[in-house]
Amino acid sequence: MVRSPRATLTHAILHPRSLDLAILIVVISAACSVGFLLTRVGQLAALDQQVRQLESFGAVVDDRTYAELRRLVPYRPAMSAAAILAGWPALWLVVAGILQLVGNRFADTLPRRPVRQSAEREGGSDEDTPRRRSLPRRSDEDTPRRRATFAQVLTIVVHASAILAVRALVAAPVNYARESLGGATSLSMVMPSFGESTFPARLLGAVDVFVLWWVVLVAMGLSILYRTRTLPIARWLFGAYAAGAMALALTQALRGGL
């Protein structure tokens, strides 16, 4: 998915299979999260994150609340593992179901991707190659748009999520070095020029670089599946993600103070 995502997604769509990869992704991600939270640095970072999250929504953390949060710190590794092992597969199923429903509903409205007639794709002798390459590009307007199966869409979502396992491997040492939990791969790390409590900082903190990468891969997979271009699908997916990030940042800003 890193070196040749299009070829990998094309093969995955032709042979839908996601269980083994899904298990590998959640195991790697859970192991990185639990391993960090079992350290002293991770426990303090988890406590600090909970306090900051409550304060970002305008809550006042008094001594009683802080003591309650400290009491939950030893359970954070188990809670994190459960959230990943159970939550991620459930989220994949929901996302795949929504994408299949919307994709099949609007498949006929998507622009069709031009098809090259070439010797490599259609076969033929070497003598036929110049003649085939000289043929104009055509659009597969006469080819019926196929409907995606749930297994195919789920395979795309899971294969794209392999990037999230890479994120876990990257974020764990970064979080340990920063002595902080969360935000290691957000845009706020790349553009830290805004004040922490400002709306731009909250918005950048809500956007994850690896999730953006995941969106690109999902859009690429859906474009292969529906025989269309990647850009129209990517625009819709980026728009949905941007709307969610903006809603989260706005909620934090309104409740926590601009």
Image (spheres, rainbow, N blue to C red):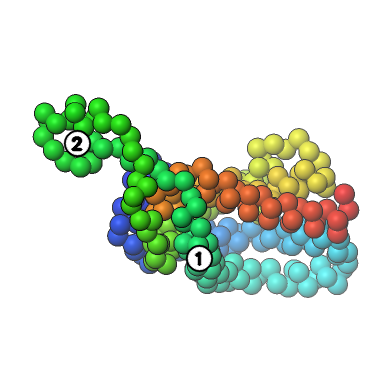
- Residue displayed at 16% across by 41% down: 123
Residue 67 left/right relative to 105: right
Depth order, front residue of 236/92: 236
In the picture of the structure, the residue carrying the numbered disc 1 is 101
- Residue displayed at 43% across by 63% down: 154
Asked whether the residues under the numbered discs 2 and 1 touch, taking CB atoms below 8 Å apart as contact, a structural biologist would say no
Residue 247 left/right relative to 163: right
Relative to 14, is 177 above or below?
A: above
In x, y percent, where is residue 227? Answer: 39, 49
Specify few, some or many for label 1: CA neighbours under 10 Å numbering under 14, 14-19, or 20 or more: some
- Residue displayed at 57% across by 46% down: 235
- Residue 119 is labelled as 2
Q: CA distance from mark 2 to mark 1?
A: 36 Å
* Amino acid at circle 2: Ala
In x, y percent, where is residue 178? Answer: 66, 46
* Amino acid at circle 1: Leu
Query: SS of the residue at dot 2?
Result: helix
In x, y percent, where is residue 161? Answer: 48, 56
Depth order, front residue of 143/169: 143
